Amino acid sequence: MWTGSLKHTRGWYGYDLPAGRFCTPAEDVYYLGDRSQLEVVEGIACLNLPGWVCPVYHYGERLQPRSGCGEHRQILVLQSRSGQREGTMLVALACDHVIKFRTARDPVRVPACMGRGPVGGVLMQQGNPVWLLSADRLIHHIEQVARHVDDDRSARRLAG
């Protein structure tokens, strides 16, 4: 029987993406929805929340963002906590098998020399890696990568 204190634990949301098991700090999670709430607004897959229209992205095995839900059933809406941005930014991530868990472990951070990809660290849970995605890193990654992926697809389509 565990007799420790929850005082020193931190809440996380764990979920599955094609590239593996990921987690996000609980304080980054704004809302948990499902694909039945998905709408297409001006050709973009969105989750329409009261006062917000939030774009929905899913990640493939190579962690490249794509608009829409893909085959995923759940949508995790994340909010930026960065003090550098005006207002709150939201992004919705399509995923599966969402659970909430607590742990006293701190994630091992990704070294700065590895760049600004979406993964910010790793937590080991029961001997398996759970990759850390924070809302701020995810938003930054989508802003930087999604338009290049879309531009590349458009260029290939035009080239025939």
Image (spheres, rainbow, N blue to C red):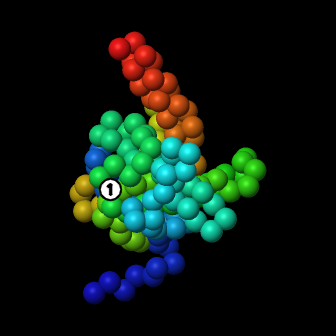
Q: Position of residue 11 (x, y in %)?
A: 47, 69
Image height check: is 121 above or below 75?
A: above
Which residue is label 1 attached to?
Answer: 72
Name the residue rendered at 45%, 65% in the picture: 37
How far from the left and from the top, in percent, is residue 67?
45, 44
Figure label count? 1
Relative horizontal placement of residue 50, taking residue 73 as reference (left or right): right
Residue 159 lies left or right of residue 7; in this view the side is left
Can you give x and y, in whole percent of width and height, for residue 59 in the image? 37, 44
Q: Residue furthest left?
A: 127
Residue at x 52% of width, y 40% of height: 142
* Residue neighbourhood size for the residue with mark 1, other residues' Cα within 10 Å, grouped as few (<14), some (14–19), many (≥20): some
Which of the two residues, 76 or 36, is positioned nearer the viewer here?
A: 36
Examine the rendering and report whether any part of residue 24 can be seen. Answer: no
Per the image, label 1 sits on a secondary structure element best described as: loop
User: The disc labelled 1 sits on which kind of residue?
Assistant: His
Q: Kindly identify the residue that appears in the image at 49 percent across and 24 percent down.
A: 151
Q: Quadrant of the N terminus?
A: bottom left
* 71 relative position to 43: left or right: left
Residue 5: image location, x then y, percent:
45, 82
Looking at the image, residue 92 lies above or below residue 142:
below
